[in-house]
């Protein structure tokens, strides 16, 4: 795997050779990181300095050196362990505020729009327009998507998003985590320009027929060592949001308001900071608070496995971060999985890479979602007197 050092214009100027090991991790809705171990000699100690930019051919991400650790092992071998983060880390160096005033006059940043619009606006206002200070502007950033268009539906209702004073990174990440969105600041290979966007990803699972499906299955010899874990220990589907000016009952997306009995899992949310005198404003804030808290209490179903290094699906060509793929275990259990992380590793054992997949939708064998539409006709199903009754 070739590692490149970039100049101030993000052009490749040097190849890093003869390294001991290298781990490069990029993520869907968080900053990535890397670790590079090289021999500690005068050349490398002068070469690797804080804020140095690195790139690899297999990725659009750029990593920034933050720490250089000069180490000597028990055998007297001296190495440099170089670590750092992807460019998204710059958002931790920006404040999420509507204005630089005082906390009494302007304590919170309130934004209205769809979640994607709000996340995009926060980046634009701070890093492109520079509403707090022109020094916050990141030069050379274009707010466009250079990847295939998203096909995973986004949340289209307007929300009221209230941001306590925090970093821009945390404000964007919290919103993205609550609404299954990702964010990225990447470098175009050809122009070296930087691009920022908030994205959903492409549905490449068996639940769609628009693009070729990406399927990881032991029968296809691209998945092995599968495991399955299910837990509802933390699951909540109803939030009772209590504030000094009233209360709201908020339901998890996909959960009907009539849910009752053992199926009703209540979360009590205290919203002491919501004190608005305008009822409509207070209601919007309590609903948003409930949604954010319920997003942290989702049912956990993990269907995992090791993807073969000889898989017919190539990262960056057949799928990317945020995309939905299908994974099938030995029992035929199927899950829509979202690619939340991708890891490149290079060491004495050679080069290898693999995705981290997180559950998006679990499909029980024999259920309606497990039915493959291309092979069935609704007329044939209706003709059976028992088919619909047999569905879980």
Image (tube, rainbow, N blue to C red):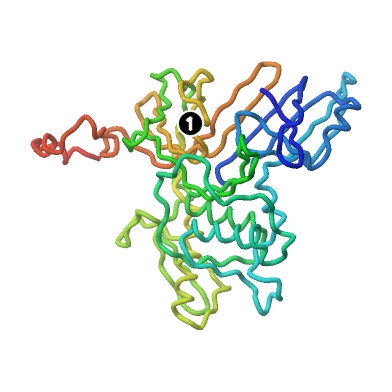
Q: Residue furthest bottom?
A: 277
Q: Give the percent coordinates (x, y) of residue 5.
A: 75, 32
Return the residue nearer the eye: 387 or 164. 164
Q: How many marks?
A: 1
Image quarter where the N terminus lies is top right
Return the residue nearer the eye: 239 or 63. 63
Q: Give the percent coordinates (x, y) of residue 300.
A: 46, 43
- Quarter holding residue 109: bottom right
SS category of the residue bearing label 1: strand
Residue at x-position 11% and y-position 39%: 382
Vertical order, 274 against 383 (above or below) = below
Q: Residue furthest front?
A: 191
- Quarter holding residue 28: top right
Vertical order, 147 against 100 (above or below) = above
Vertical order, 328 against 170 (above or below) = above
Residue behind mark 1: 304
- Quarter holding residue 122: bottom right
Q: Give the percent coordinates (x, y) of residue 154.
A: 42, 52
Image quarter where the C terminus lies is top left
In this picture, residue 98 sits left or right of residue 159: right
Return the residue nearer the eye: 29 or 189. 189
Around disc 1, counting alpha carbons within 10 Å, would you say few (fewer than 14), some (14 to 19), or many (20 or more)? many
Q: Give the percent coordinates (x, y) of residue 4.
A: 72, 30
């Amino acid at each position: 795997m070739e590692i490149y050092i970039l100049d101030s214009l993000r052009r490749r100027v040097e190849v890093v050779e003869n390294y001991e090991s290298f781990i490069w991790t990029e993520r869907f809705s968080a900053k990535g990181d890397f670790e590079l171990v090289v021999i500690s000699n005068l050349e490398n100690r002068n070469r690797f300095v804080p804020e140095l930019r690195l790139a690899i051919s297999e990725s659009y991400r750029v990593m920034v050196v933050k720490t250089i650790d000069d180490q000597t092992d028990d055998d007297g071998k001296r190495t440099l362990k170089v670590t750092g983060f992807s460019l998204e880390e710059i958002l931790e160096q920006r404040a999420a505020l509507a204005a630089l005033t005082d906390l009494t006059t302007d304590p919170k940043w309130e934004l209205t729009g769809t979640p994607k619009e709000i996340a995009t606006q926060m980046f634009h206002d701070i890093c492109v327009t520079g509403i707090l200070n022109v020094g916050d502007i990141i030069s050379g950033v274009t707010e466009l998507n250079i990847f295939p268009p998203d096909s995973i539906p986004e949340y289209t209702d307007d929300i009221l998003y209230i941001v306590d004073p925090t970093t821009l990174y945390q404000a964007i990440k919290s919103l993205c985590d609550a609404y299954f969105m990702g964010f990225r600041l990447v470098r175009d290979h050809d122009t070296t320009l930087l691009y920022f966007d908030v994205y959903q990803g492409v549905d490449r699972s068996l639940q769609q027929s628009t693009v070729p499906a990406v399927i990881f299955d032991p029968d296809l010899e691209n998945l092995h060592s599968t495991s399955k874990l299910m837990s509802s220990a933390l699951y909540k589907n109803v939030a009772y949001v209590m504030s000094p000016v009233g209360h709201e009952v908020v339901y998890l997306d996909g959960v009907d308001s009539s849910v009752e009995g053992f199926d009703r899992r209540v979360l009590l949310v205290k919203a002491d900071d919501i004190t608005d005198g305008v009822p409509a404003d207070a209601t919007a804030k309590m609903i948003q608070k409930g949604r954010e808290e319920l997003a942290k209490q989702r049912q956990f179903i993990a269907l995992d496995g090791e993807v073969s290094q000889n898989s017919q699906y190539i990262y960056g060509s057949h799928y990317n971060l945020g995309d939905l793929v299908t994974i099938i275990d030995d029992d035929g259990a199927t899950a829509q999985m979202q690619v939340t992380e991708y890891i490149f590793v290079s060491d004495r054992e050679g080069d290898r890479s693999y995705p981290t997949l997180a559950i998006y939708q679990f499909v029980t064998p024999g259920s309606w979602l497990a039915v493959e539409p291309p092979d069935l006709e609704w007329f044939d199903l209706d003709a059976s007197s028992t088919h619909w009754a047999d569905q879980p």
